[in-house]
Amino acid sequence: MPSASPGRCRAQASRSPDSSSALTVSTAEPRYGTGLSARPSSWPRIRAAGAFAVNILAEDQRELWRRFAVTGGDKFAGVPWRPGGNGAPLLDGVLATVECTLEGVLDGGDRAIVLGRVTGPAVHRAGEPPLLYFRRAYGRLPSSSMSASMAAARSRSEA
């Protein structure tokens, strides 16, 4: 959703898709993958822009997750955000953000499996737990695995 002008970025952001899953595809050459709804109002914008961002929510951001999990409406109304280096919306106060350049797409039925080269990883709230949602319930990582995961992500992004 990149854009040179904040007004255009805002218009694109208001129709931004959400993803409930994301994965690291490669750590050697940092790549990220996510599944996006293939509905006409969102996916074509990312394809045309050639870039996207993943906002990783913290455990205390359940209400923000609910806002983006529903279809329709302006999901960004009243939500502080800024355009990232690639123009995609980065939400203020999230645990981490991952900006990517679009590299490929796989057909996932009702989802487009989007692959991107990581261009802007950032940890904003180090040491805090992520928001996890699995089988219609919220969950938690053991605190020891959280610290190790965040440290590993930080060292890779600084390399």
Image (tube, helix red, strand yellow):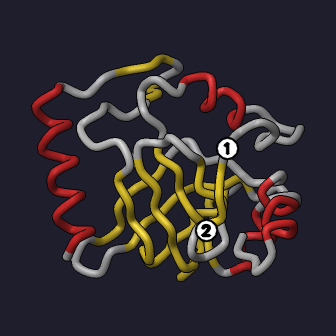
Residue tagged by mark 2?
A: 52
Seen in the image, is 158 located left or right of residue 78? left
Residue 112 higher or lower than 80, as above or below: below
- Would you say 90 lies left or right of 128 here? right
| Disc 2 element | strand
Q: Earlier in the sequence, mark 1 or mark 2?
A: 2
At a point 38% along the width and 60% down the height, the residue shown is 122
Q: Which mark is residue 120?
A: none
x, y percent for residue 64: 62, 30
Query: Residue at (12%, 44%) from the top-left corner?
Result: 148
Residue 111, image x, y percentages: 67, 55
Cα distance in 3D space between marks 1 and 2: 18 Å
CA neighbours of label 1 inside 10 A, class few (<14), some (14 to 19), many (20+): few
The residue identified by callout 1 is 80
* Three-letter code for the amino acid on which mark 2 is drawn: Phe
Q: Residue furthest toward the top?
A: 137
Circle 1: element type: loop
Q: Give the class, few, some or many, for how many residues have Cα within 10 Å of label 2's Cα (few <14, many ≥20).
A: many
Q: Position of residue 16 (x, y in %)?
A: 75, 54
Q: Are marks 1 and 2 in contact (CB under 8 Å)?
A: no
Point out the frontmost of discs 1 and 2.
1
Q: Nearer the viewer, residue 98 or 37?
A: 98
